[in-house]
């Protein structure tokens, strides 16, 4: 196993959690490290001493989560974050059929949502309107999405729309290297300190950022990025830039209302960086169309499938390819990382895209 984070840091922060002396931002970063390394381990199937030590620490952390969730003095938001990570760890362990510990089989999608509703003292029944009401509450309260975009998202989920034909216009065929993208994003500024990790088996770039901590970006290659692949790297650079800026603000002013801890604002910032990069390279209406496809319309169809599966308890799953065809869109292969998202997490992308491209309705028939 390749361990991409400092094992001593993970162990130290886990010990601080066990002693109840972990700060909010330390805990957020610990959760991100454990979640990211756990997902990465699914791509790198090796067993060595590092992996065994990591698993021992994760087992300690899992036990701490289980005990902490029984306490009454944690906020609903803290319980939400802990429960979702606990559920992910259970999923990994159940899938691997590891008999060495006592993790249980994870909840199905509706049971996850019902548990979250109980955490927030919200009613929930397995009925369309009830699920919609709670998801609306969750999207606004936990993800920070404005209500008007939540209404628009559900309207698209439940309506029968189709996209306009792809507009005419040229897109650059230029290929970018990681160095090209860094030069564009950081310019003449000194490149900040962060780690870049190359994992050729991952099918989506992602980053792990934290206030006051080392930042990491995970990508599958260093050369031959096409325009939209390069824009996704810019997306992750923006997350890192935001975390570094907020680290500075936090150390200077003790500011606690942080962008990188608000999913909607964080993704809006990163998606805007993507959009500016595309515009800077001469994309026409066709480029805006493809950007909206990726960040609004395909995610809406994922949410449509997710809502259906919540309602029917995963017994009659709605296939993503089928939904794409129904809406006149080309079926695309799904990233395996999609399965790791929290409930309706893609709604943050949808809302951000609506905010950034105010004329999104013009791309519908």
Image (cartoon, rainbow, N blue to C red):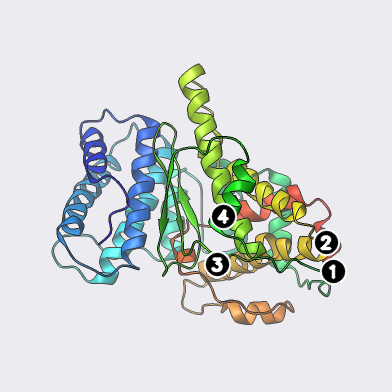
Q: Residue at x 27, y 70 (%)?
A: 45
Q: Which residue is mark 4?
A: 233
In the picture, the quarter occupied by the C terminus is: bottom right
Question: Disc 1 marks which residue?
Answer: 169
- In this rendering, is residue 153 above or below 140? below
Q: Where residue 179 sits in the image (x, y, percent)?
A: 55, 53
Find residue 40 and report its image quarter: bottom left
| Above/below status of 80 relative to 16 | below
Q: Is residue 150 left or right of residue 61?
A: right
Spot occupied by residue 81 in the image (x, y as percentages of width and height)? 41, 45
Please tell me whether mark 1 or mark 3 is closer to you in this view.
1
The residues tagged by marks 3 and 2 sit, at their Cα atoms, a distance apart of 32 Å
The answer to whether residue 333 of the structure is visible from this angle is yes
Residue 11 % position (x, y): 21, 42
* Residue 290 position within the rendered picture, expressed as x and y whole percent measured from the top left: 73, 66
Q: Mark 2 sits on what residue?
A: 284
In the shown orientation, is residue 168 left or right of residue 156? right
Q: Secondary structure at mark 1?
A: loop
Say few, some or many: other residues with alpha carbon within 10 Å of mark 1 (under 14 / 14 to 19 / 20 or more).
Answer: few
User: Is the residue marked by circle 3 packed among few (<14), some (14-19), or many (20+) residues within 10 Å?
Assistant: many
Callout 3: SS: helix
Left/right of residue 158 with respect to residue 17 in the rendered view: right
Snapshot quadrant of residue 163: bottom right
In what element is the residue under mark 4? helix
Task: Check the image and report above or below for 3 versus 164.
Answer: above
Please name which of the two marks, 3 or 2, marks the residue nearer to the observer. Answer: 2
Tag 1 near tag 3, CB within 8 Å: no
Q: CA distance from mark 4 to mark 2?
A: 21 Å
Residue identifier under label 3: 306
Residue most toward the top? Answer: 253
Q: Nearer the viewer, residue 191 or 235?
A: 191
Give the distance between the C-alpha atoms of the residues marked 4 and 3, in whole angstroms.
27 Å
């Amino acid at each position: 196993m390749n361990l991409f984070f400092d094992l001593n840091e993970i162990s130290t922060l886990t010990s601080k959690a066990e002693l109840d002396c972990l700060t909010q931002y330390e805990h957020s970063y610990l959760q991100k490290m454990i979640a990211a390394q756990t997902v990465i381990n699914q791509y790198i199937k090796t067993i060595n001493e590092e992996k065994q030590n990591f698993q021992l620490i994760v087992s300690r952390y899992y036990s701490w989560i289980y005990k902490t969730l029984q306490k009454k003095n944690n906020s609903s938001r803290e319980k939400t974050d802990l429960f979702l990570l606990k559920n992910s760890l259970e999923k990994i362990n159940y899938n691997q059929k590891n008999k060495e510990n006592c993790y249980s089989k994870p909840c199905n999608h509706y049971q996850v949502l019902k548990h979250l509703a109980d955490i927030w003292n919200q009613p929930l029944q397995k009925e369309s309107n009830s699920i919609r009401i709670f998801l609306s509450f969750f999207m606004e309260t936990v993800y920070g999405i404005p209500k008007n975009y939540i209404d628009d998202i559900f309207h698209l989920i439940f309506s029968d729309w189709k996209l306009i034909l792809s507009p005419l216009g040229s897109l650059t065929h230029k290929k970018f290297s990681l160095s090209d993208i860094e030069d564009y994003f950081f310019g003449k500024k000194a490149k900040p300190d962060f780690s870049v990790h190359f994992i050729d088996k991952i099918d989506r770039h992602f980053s792990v950022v934290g206030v006051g901590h080392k930042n990491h970006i995970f990508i599958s290659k260093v050369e031959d990025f096409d325009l939209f692949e390069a824009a996704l790297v810019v997306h992750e650079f923006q997350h890192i830039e935001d975390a570094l800026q907020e680290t500075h603000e936090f150390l200077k002013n003790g500011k606690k209302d942080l962008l990188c801890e608000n999913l909607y604002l964080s993704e809006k910032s990163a998606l805007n960086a993507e959009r500016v990069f595309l515009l800077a390279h001469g994309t026409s209406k066709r480029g805006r169309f493809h950007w909206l496809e990726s960040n609004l319309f395909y995610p809406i169809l994922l949410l449509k499938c997710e809502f259906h599966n919540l309602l029917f308890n995963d017994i009659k799953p709605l296939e993503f390819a089928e939904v794409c065809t129904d809406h006149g869109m080309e079926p695309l292969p799904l990233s395996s990382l999609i399965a790791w998202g929290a409930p309706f997490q893609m709604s943050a992308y949808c809302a951000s895209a609506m905010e950034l491209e105010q004329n999104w309705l013009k791309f519908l028939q």
